[in-house]
Amino acid sequence: MSKRTLFLIFALFIIASTLLAVALYKPSLNPTLTILPTPTPKELVGQTSLIFGSPLLSSSAASLSYSLPINIATGTNKVTAVQLELQYDPLILTNISVSPGSFFQNPVVLLNQIDTKTGRISYAFGINPTDQGVAGQGTVAILNFKALTSEKTAIIFLPKTLVAAEGTTQSVLKTTINATFTLEKLSSTPPNSSSPSAQ
């Protein structure tokens, strides 16, 4: 037998073996399914609201100051941090300061910037790294100020206001409600009223 004949016999053997293997192969009738996690829409994740309360008047013989609570309602979110970005009229309000409320037990202040020329407040704070996220309702921060005039004014939440929570990397802030009110102006003789008119 020549080498060419042997090569042809060997080639035919390989082809026949391949065809036989293909004919005998039975694919699995129950293929394994890989289930990928579906991204959770933001409207399902974000359930937290930030709402201004009513301004509270604190007066003495020489000064007239206000405290404005910023309230939080988290839904099922376990909140770990809040970044407040606020805008106010610096021609109407003065002596602005922000402090944490009672919502977080031992809050850590991460950012505290108040631009008295533009009326911009950036204030960020949150839980200690070893603490758990907090769910529920309460006063998350308090805005303190004095009034220069008795005009109607507003303090608004800016779009960069954020709320961080456990289990997600996106902000869980769903809604904000701004504050609009009329205050008595700073004077040496405080008025008899115990609270400003909020609208």
Image (cartoon, rainbow, N blue to C red):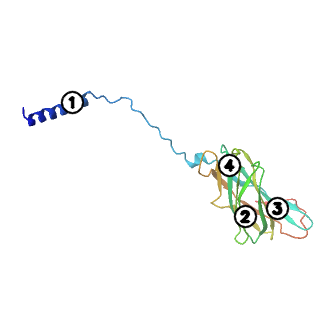
Residue contact between numbered discs 4 and 2, judged by CB atoms under 8 Å: no
The residue identified by callout 4 is 80
- Count the labels in the image: 4
Residue that appears at 21% across and 30% down: 17
1 or 2: tag closer to the N-terminus? 1
Rendering coords of residue 140 (x, y %): 74, 52
Residue contact between numbered discs 3 and 1, judged by CB atoms under 8 Å: no
4 or 3: tag closer to the N-terminus? 3
Residue 111, quarter of the rendered image? bottom right
Residue that appears at 76% across and 66% down: 152
Q: Residue furthest left?
A: 1
Residue 66's label in the rendered image is 3
Residue 154's label in the rendered image is 2
Q: Which element type, helix, strand or loop, lies under badge 2?
A: strand
Q: Which element type, helix, strand or loop, lies under badge 4?
A: strand
* Image quadrant occupied by the N terminus: top left
Rendering coords of residue 128 (x, y %): 71, 49
Q: Residues within 10 Å of mark 4 (few under 14, many from 20)?
A: many
Question: What's the distance in space between the residues labelled 1 and 4, CA to CA?
Answer: 65 Å
